Each structure stands twice: as C-alpha cells, then as structure tokens.
Image (cartoon, rainbow, N blue to C red):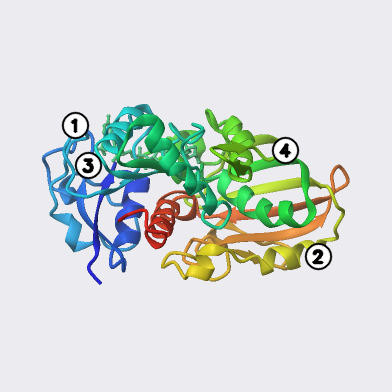
C-alpha cells in the first residue's frame, strides 16, 4: 500500500523528535516535511536538532530542510508539536487551507467543535469534524489529543465510569522532565528536588477528562458529571507521568473487581488493530511497588497505561496508581493513533 505523506510541525522539540522516531517505518505514514522556528528554518534537520532519543535519528529525515512555520506543506496530514504560544493561528491557517491537523498543543482542545480524542475512550467524538468544517468554513480540520497527564487518568476512568459510575476524583501527579520540552527545567532547579507547580496544568486535568468522557448529543458534548481536584508536581524522571488517583464510585466495588474490569478493557483501536494501538490498553501490575516510570513506561511500546496498587480508600472508594509514557501515549503516539483511527474511518480521503 502507498504511504500517506505527512508533515511534522515543531519537529526539533521533545515531542517532534518522538514523532520522527515513531513514524520511522510506519505502515501508513511517511514524513516528507518538517518545520521549526526561525532558529532552524532553512537548515538541515540534523544540523539543528539536538537529538535526545536513544535510537538513531532516522536517515530519511536527517537531510530534510526544516521549513518555517508559514511554509506551504506538501502533505494533507500534519502532526503538530508546536508550543501553545504559537500553535493557535498556525493550526487554524492549515485547517482552513485543507490540512488535517492532529495536534498536541492545548490551544484548541476545549473548543466545542474540536474533537479531543483518545481512540479507546471517545472515538465517536470525531463526528464533530463536519460540525467544525461547517461552522468555520474549513476544508481541513483540527483534531487534538489531551494533555499527557489527563491521558492515564482518562484511560482508567473510561471502564470505571462505564461499569461503576464515578462521582469525584482526587489526582496527584508526578510528571517527568520531558513534559516540559527540551531543554526544559534547569538541572539546578530539579536535581535533588520536586517542584510542586506546573503552570496551567491543574485546570487542564480538571476539565479535559470530562470532555473526553462526555456524551456527544447532536453537535454538542455534554461533559461527564464527576468533579476532579488535581495537584501537579515535576519530578526528576526523564519520561513517564505517574498519577495517584483516589476515586469515589457510584456503585461500590472491591479492588479485585476493579482490577478485572481494567485488565479486560478493550476498545475500537484494538478491534481495528490500528498499528500503534497496544494489544492491552490497561495493564494491571500486582507487585506492591509497581508501576514505576523507569520499569513500566515502555509497556505496549509506550502506549499502554500501567496500573497498580489498587486498594481501598478511606476518603473515597478506591485508590490506585497509573503510569503513562508522556511523550509517546501522552503526545506523539497519541496523535499518530488518532490519525490511524481517522484513516481507518475514511477521514483522510
Ligand atoms: N512534552 C510532552 O510530554 C507533551 C507536550 N505536549 C505539547 O506538545 C507541544 C510541543 O512540546 P515540546 O516538544 O515539549 O516542546 P519543545 O519546546 O521541546 O519544542 C518546541 C518545537 O516548536 C518549535 N518552535 C518554537 N517556537 C516556535 C515558533 N515561534 N514558531 C514555530 N515553531 C516554533 C521549536 O523549533 P526550534 O527548535 O527550531 O526552535 C521546536 O521544534 C506543546 O504544545 C506541548 O504543550 C503535549 C503533551 C505532552
Ligand atoms: N504540561 C505538561 C506537558 C504539556 O505540554 O502539556 P499541554 O500539552 O497540556 O500543554 C507537562 O509538563 O508534563
């Protein structure tokens, strides 16, 4: 099968590099264009990219010339890893010009006509695409994936909400350094330390899951009705965001029942066998000290959510730990899986 040409915006950054890595040898998509800031535009990718991943920079992209953010792109499908300071108007311009923009940036996530998608959670919300096109007069579209910390919480909540109902949740995160991009948090601030603040993060965790877990009624998403309180912390780990969740359920359940429901969870990406989908979206570990970022973040090629320490909670009903790879399932892998779903459902035609 011929591959579909794609462009990566913000290709030199932490998430951009993950896109390049995950798209190497991809069965559907082939990288043909890259963009960067003024710093990089006009230069070869290998000259301007400080490659921080453990696999070599793919030869096929090393000699591509980095384009500037305003360039015409030779690909309908565009993956955006742009900073939110600049992503808004660039992504809108591309969607108006007919591109399908699968974006990591937070700018458009909460707009009512923009799908905010985890394919295992709310694939039906792609039905907002024609609504978006009609309202904005666009021939392309913007489809977003969530914040990298919303991701593990929302994955776990999908089967819990469907099986038991959810009333309230307390979330405490321990977020990896790569979440702050490259070069990110100065080593002088974070080595031997925990930083109990990530700008703008807590409100996102309190609203994004409600949108994804909400019901699409006509042209509107009715948010899921539970409430969340979030605390976010930056910890000296390279990759892998850990969240401690305390959850109040509508119907009581014991830890063994919760573990079974989470382990048995399967969804459309598994049914469709999408190339980037993990076979098992939620893996439950039973050891007392798992999941751990270093040991568990690569489960399911970085696309699985690893859950452990499921136990009773004296404030709410249950508590557990969930881990997700922030630059794979929380960013580049998430966008690619969204694009695979859109391809399978005919949106990229
Ligand atoms: N890191 C993570 O875990 C996650 C990140 N995200 C989101 O993904 C996006 C990318 O994040 P991340 O990779 O961490 O960021 P980085 O800071 O590591 O990379 C930013 C990229 O954008 C380019 N860029 C910077 N300024 C401009 C500009 N003015 N015009 C055009 N391009 C520009 C940079 O190019 P150059 O190198 O040429 O300057 C670089 O390629 C952000 O919106 C972030 O919030 C989402 C989920 C998780
Ligand atoms: N803020 C997240 C990463 C991120 O970029 O989030 P968002 O895509 O919501 O801006 C972190 O630091 O780990």
Judging by the rendered image, the residue that carries numbered circle 2 is 257
Where is residue 191 shown, x and y percent of the image?
Answer: 51, 41
Where is residue 1 shown, x and y percent of the image?
Answer: 25, 72
Q: Which residue does the image show at 28% across and 34% down from the upper left?
A: 96
Judging by the rendered image, the residue that carries numbered circle 4 is 225
**Ligand 1 quadrant assignment:** top left
How far apart marks 4 and 1 lie (CA) works out to 44 Å
How far apart marks 4 and 2 lie (CA) works out to 23 Å
Q: Is mark 2 within 8 Å of ligand 2?
A: no
Task: Characterize the local packing of mark 2: few (<14), some (14-19) or many (20 or more) Cα atoms within 10 angstroms.
Answer: few
Is the residue under label 1 in contact with that under label 3 (CB below 8 Å)?
A: no
> From the image, which quarter does the C terminus lie in?
bottom left
Task: Characterize the local packing of mark 4: few (<14), some (14-19) or many (20 or more) Cα atoms within 10 angstroms.
Answer: few
Disc 3 element: loop
Task: Characterize the local packing of mark 1: few (<14), some (14-19) or many (20 or more) Cα atoms within 10 angstroms.
Answer: few
> Does residue 123 appear in the picture of this structure?
yes
Name which of mark 4 and mark 3 comes first in the sequence.
3
The numbered mark at residue 38 is 1
Is the residue under label 1 in contact with that under label 4 (CB below 8 Å)?
A: no
Task: Indicate which label's residue lies in the foreground, 2 or 1.
Answer: 2
Compared to residue 195, the image places residue 51 above or below, namely below
Is the residue under label 1 in contact with that under label 2 (CB below 8 Å)?
A: no
How far apart marks 4 and 3 lie (CA) works out to 40 Å
Name which of mark 3 and mark 2 comes first in the sequence.
3
Viewer-side residue, 268 vs 83: 268
Viewer-side residue, 89 vs 329: 89
Name which of mark 4 and mark 2 comes first in the sequence.
4
Q: Which residue does the image show at 47% across and 42% down from the upper left?
A: 128
Compared to residue 312, the image places residue 43 above or below, namely above
Please give left or right for residue 213 compared with residue 33 in the image.
Answer: right
């Amino acid at each position: 099968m011929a591959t579909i040409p794609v462009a990566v915006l913000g290709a030199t950054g932490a998430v951009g590099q993950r896109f390049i890595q995950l798209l190497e040898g991809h069965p559907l998509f082939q990288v043909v264009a890259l963009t960067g800031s003024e710093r990089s535009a006009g230069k070869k990718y290998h000259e301007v990219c400080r490659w921080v991943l453990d696999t070599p920079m793919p030869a096929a992209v090393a000699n591509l010339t980095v384009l500037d953010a305003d360039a015409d792109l030779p690909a309908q499908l565009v993956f955006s890893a742009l900073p939110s300071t600049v992503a808004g108007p660039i992504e809108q311009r591309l969607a108006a010009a007919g591109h399908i923009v699968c974006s990591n940036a937070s700018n458009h996530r909460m707009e009512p006509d923009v799908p905010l998608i985890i394919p295992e959670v709310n694939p039906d919300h792609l039905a907002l695409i024609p609504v978006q096109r009609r309202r904005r007069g666009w021939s392309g579209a913007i489809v977003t994936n969530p914040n990298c910390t919303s991701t593990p919480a929302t994955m776990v909540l999908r089967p819990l909400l469907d099986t038991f109902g959810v009333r309230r949740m307390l979330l405490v995160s321990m977020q990896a350094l790569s979440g702050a991009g490259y070069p990110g948090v100065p080593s002088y601030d974070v080595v031997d330390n925990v930083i109990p603040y990530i700008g703008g993060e807590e409100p996102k965790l309190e609203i994004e899951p409600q949108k994804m877990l909400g019901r699409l009624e006509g042209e509107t998403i009715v948010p899921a009705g539970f409430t969340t309180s979030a605390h976010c912390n930056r910890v000296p780990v390279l990759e892998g965001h850990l969240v401690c969740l305390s959850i109040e359920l509508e119907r009581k359940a014991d830890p063994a029942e919760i573990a079974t429901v989470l382990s048995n969870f399967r969804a459309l990406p598994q049914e469709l066998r999408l190339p980037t989908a993990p076979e098992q979206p939620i893996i439950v570990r039973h050891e007392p000290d798992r999941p751990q970022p270093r040991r568990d973040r690569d489960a399911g090629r970085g696309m699985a959510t690893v859950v452990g320490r499921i136990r009773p909670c004296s404030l709410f009903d249950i508590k557990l730990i969930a881990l997700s790879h922030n630059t794979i399932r929380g960013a580049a892998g998430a966008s690619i899986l969204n694009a695979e779903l859109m391809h399978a459902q005919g949106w990229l035609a």
